[in-house]
């Protein structure tokens, strides 16, 4: 596998012009009477600054750069629920997450490929990372059967039988044309017995090797494959997994199998003890996490990338994330409150609409309320990560961390 920054050609031979599945502008160079087109850039990661364990970096992908720490809104089924792609981009999001399991079931990876790839299909020109589908198979599918080869299961939609192997997961993600591919792994819910945690971790390592071979066989130069650290809440198993994945060699490394039932302090302890075992010159991704506080504390422990459904899921249920903490707009105290959610927010929706109006939309179950709060929440997550990036660059991450937590504790009630 090419390491970060090596190579600059995209071997699939796709045309990176407007409307292509890669969503990149064509750059023409006149020479010898013909027009030549640039190829997508290679994947790379640059670590620009550290402050303690906190890291400020930049990832370059075929569809553009990503400033880290970064939060990826979740577009599971080729959409961030209820939001136009342009509105998601306006929040400051640079990369979205899609999901192999959901897209393989509906509308199907081959269909998306025939329609130009996931970027064109969902009208998102920026980078996309796809989860391999392993977690969803374990949590959503019925009648699962796990073997060394892979996992067979029946769709939670219509009961159709499927088989997902490391090779098929890589094939699906290549058909989608995503910038960052994830290996197939087995994710256990916690708590679990140590023997079962170790069995799943060892199987995930064997699947990691197969995923890498399958990825390399497709010769997608410029694109990236991440390995996934497993090991449950067992620190030595986590460290063994991290070291073994490093020996296999990936463009980036994810910490998976957390936020699955364990307390926050356990999750953060695992992260703190795992990240030092990962290469410093590759991005680190904490999968499926989480609350703003989770993200703040994980950045303090060396994580670069995050995803979570919480901003949109909570937004659809009347909950707003702000620098004052989480606000429940269904509470009656907001019915006569003319204040915006946050007059200092960089996103106009948080500054424009009154709490009284958002309360009304929430109580009336109006779709606009769900859309506005989902947008406001994603924008807050983007503002939080942007604030962390600036603080790391300035060497004041701990001050930012303390001030942010104090703001959440003070809350949003007006002064008496």
Image (cartoon, rainbow, N blue to C red):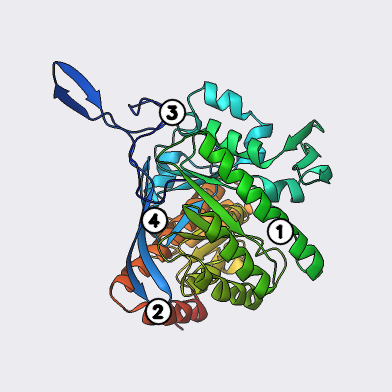
Residue sitting at x 66%, y 31%: 106
Residue topped by disc 3: 12
Is 67 positioned to the left or the right of 176 in the image?
A: left
Q: Viewer-nearest of labels 3 and 4?
A: 3
Task: Answer whether residue 81 is visible to the viewer in this image.
Answer: no
Q: Viewer-nearest of labels 2 and 1?
A: 1
Badge 3 element: loop
Query: Do labels 1 and 3 touch, CB within 8 Å?
Result: no
Sequence order check, earlier mark of 2 and 1: 2
Sequence order check, earlier mark of 2 and 4: 2
Query: Do labels 2 and 4 touch, CB within 8 Å?
Result: no
Quadrant hosting residue 133: top right
Extreme residue in the front direction: 247
- Residue 202 disc label: 1
Q: Camera-side residue: 246 or 337?
A: 246
Q: Camera-side residue: 196 or 111?
A: 196
Is 99 positioned to the left or the right of 50 in the image?
A: right
Q: Viewer-nearest of labels 2 and 3?
A: 3
Is 164 positioned to the left or the right of 170 in the image?
A: right
Quote the CA–CA distance across marks 2 and 4. Answer: 37 Å
Badge 1 element: helix
Residue topped by disc 4: 352
Q: Is residue 15 above or below residue 299?
A: above
Q: Viewer-nearest of labels 4 and 1?
A: 1
Task: Answer whether residue 26 is visible to the viewer in this image.
Answer: yes
Q: Camera-side residue: 345 or 231?
A: 231
On the image, the x and y values in percent for residue 170 come to: 59, 39
Sequence order check, earlier mark of 1 and 3: 3
Q: Viewer-nearest of labels 2 and 4?
A: 2
């Amino acid at each position: 596998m090419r390491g970060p920054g090596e190579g600059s050609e995209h071997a699939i031979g796709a045309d990176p012009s407007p409307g292509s599945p890669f969503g990149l502008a064509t750059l023409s160079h006149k020479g010898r009477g013909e027009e030549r087109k640039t190829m997508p850039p290679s994947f790379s990661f640059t670590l620009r600054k550290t402050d303690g364990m906190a890291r400020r970096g930049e990832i370059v992908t075929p569809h553009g750069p990503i400033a880290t720490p970064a939060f990826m809104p979740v577009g599971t089924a080729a959409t961030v629920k209820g939001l136009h792609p342009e509105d998601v981009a306006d929040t400051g999001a640079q990369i979205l997450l899609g999901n192999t399991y959901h897209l393989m079931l509906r509308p199907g990876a081959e269909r998306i490929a025939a329609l130009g790839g996931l970027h064109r299909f969902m009208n998102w020109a920026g980078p996309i990372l796809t989860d391999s589908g392993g977690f969803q198979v374990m949590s959503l599918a019925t009648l699962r059967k796990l073997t060394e080869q892979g996992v067979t299961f029946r769709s939670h939609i219509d009961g159709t039988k499927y088989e997902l192997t490391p090779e098929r997961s890589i094939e699906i993600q290549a058909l989608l044309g995503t910038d960052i591919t994830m290996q197939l792994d087995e994710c256990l819910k916690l708590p679990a017995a140590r023997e079962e945690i170790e069995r799943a971790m060892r199987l995930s390592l064997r699947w990691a090797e197969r995923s890498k071979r399958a990825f390399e066989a497709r010769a997608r130069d410029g694109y990236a494959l991440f390995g996934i650290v497993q090991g449950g809440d067992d620190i030595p198993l986590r460290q063994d997994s991290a070291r073994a994945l490093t020996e296999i060699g990936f463009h980036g490394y994810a910490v998976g199998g957390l936020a699955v039932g364990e307390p926050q302090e356990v999750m953060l302890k695992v992260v703190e003890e795992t990240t030092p075992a990962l290469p410093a010159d590759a991005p680190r991704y904490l999968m499926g996490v989480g609350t703003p506080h989770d993200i703040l504390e994980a950045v303090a422990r060396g994580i670069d990338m995050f995803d979570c459904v919480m901003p949109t899921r909570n937004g659809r249920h009347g909950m707003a994330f702000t620098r004052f903490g989480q606000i429940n707009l269904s509470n009656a105290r907001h019915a006569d409150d003319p204040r915006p959610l946050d007059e200092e927010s960089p996103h106009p929706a948080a500054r424009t609409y009154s709490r009284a109006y958002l309360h009304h939309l929430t109580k009336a179950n109006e779709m606009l309320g769900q859309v506005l709060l989902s947008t406001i929440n994603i924008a807050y997550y983007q503002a939080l990560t942007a604030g962390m990036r600036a603080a790391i660059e300035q060497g004041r991450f701990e001050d930012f961390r303390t001030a942010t937590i104090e703001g959440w504790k003070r809350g949003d009630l007006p002064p008496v």
